[in-house]
Amino acid sequence: MGCERWGDKLGAYADGELDRADANAVGLHLRECAVCAADVLDQVQMKRSVQMAGRRYSASTDLRNRVRELVASKPRRQTGRLWKILLIPALAVLILSVAVSLYVKRESARRHGVYSELADLHVAALASATPVDVLSTDRHTVKPWFQGKIPFSFNLPELQGSEFTLVGGRVTYLAQTPGAHLIYQVRKHEVSVFIFQDRGEETASLPSGPVHVLSFNVENWSQNGLRYFVVGDVGSEDIEGLSRLLRAAG
């Protein structure tokens, strides 16, 4: 498969903008072409650098509180009693509507940011020449490797009789929080499993369940204080099947 065929689609693949058929085809091509894989990896790393830079300059809670205090301390002009009676309820409704709208948008952006970052980690692993640091199909080899590298432990499922094969794992980070990144294979496709402690704003309030994000199917749930994410460009039935095995092991 010639690189010229996919050159104009690599950027869309890194951004998760391809449909499932093209995403599958590009994913398979990346396993065979080191040049395209390196290109995608560079794009994903650039996206993550921009995301980290954006977080660095976000307003602190202390700054927000000081701005609120300054606004609240400004003198207000006295208005007629009638205008107060008419305006206060209307303003209250307006403020409430704006607050709800901003909250919904903020939550949606936060969830999208989490899923987008996980999709980037998944794509980066597929494009990397060394997607895992511990390479083994044996869960009894992979699980102990993480001891001392992340601040929690987890169980891995027995895969005998299933279509899934454990490839290996590596330590990864979500919002500077360490976790486990495991890679499984099903019918020549790789599926990423991310496990983090279920605490902090990034993951604790995420609703459990399947979602379709960018070009990937994602399943996430909380279990025993841990948050699991299963990400891949395979069908939802494969994501659900691997998720069931992980839940049973947990």
Image (cartoon, grey):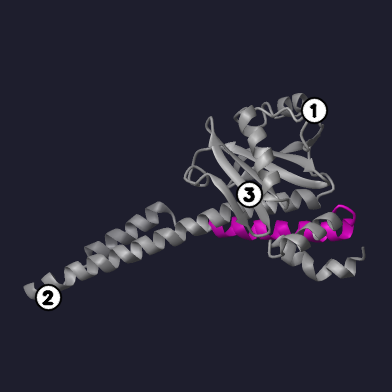
Q: How crowded is mark 1: few (under 14 residues within 10 Å), some or many (20 or more)?
A: some
Where is mark 1, residue-wise?
138
Front disc: 2 or 3: 3
Report the amino acid beneath label 1: Asp
Residue in the picture at 51% in, 55% down? 110
The earlier-in-sequence mark between 2 and 3 is: 2
Residue in the picture at 77% in, 56% down? 41
Q: Is residue 249 above or below residue 18?
A: above
The picture places residue 203, in percent across and down from the top left corner, at 52, 44
Answer whether labels 1 and 3 touch (C-beta < 8 Å).
no
Q: Is residue 149 above or below residue 27?
A: above
The earlier-in-sequence mark between 1 and 2 is: 2
Residue 40 magenta-highlighted: yes
Answer whether labels 2 and 3 touch (C-beta < 8 Å).
no
Label 1 – label 2 distance at C-alpha: 74 Å
The picture places residue 127, in percent across and down from the top left corner, at 80, 53
The picture places residue 5, in percent across and down from the top left corner, at 87, 69
Where is mark 2, residue-wise?
83
The picture places residue 69, in percent across and down from the top left corner, at 28, 59
Q: Main secondary structure of the magenta part?
A: helix
Q: Residues within 10 Å of mark 3 (few under 14, many from 20)?
A: many
Q: From this viewpoint, which residue is outermost toward the left?
A: 81
Front disc: 1 or 2: 1
Please state the extent of the stretch shown in magenta in the rendering.
31-56
Report the amino acid beneath label 2: Trp
Question: Does dot 1 land on a helix, a strand or a loop?
Answer: loop
The earlier-in-sequence mark between 1 and 3 is: 1
In the foreground, 154 or 22: 22
| Position of the N terminus by quadrant | bottom right
Where is mark 3, residue-wise?
218
Image-based side of 69 in relation to 144, left or right: left
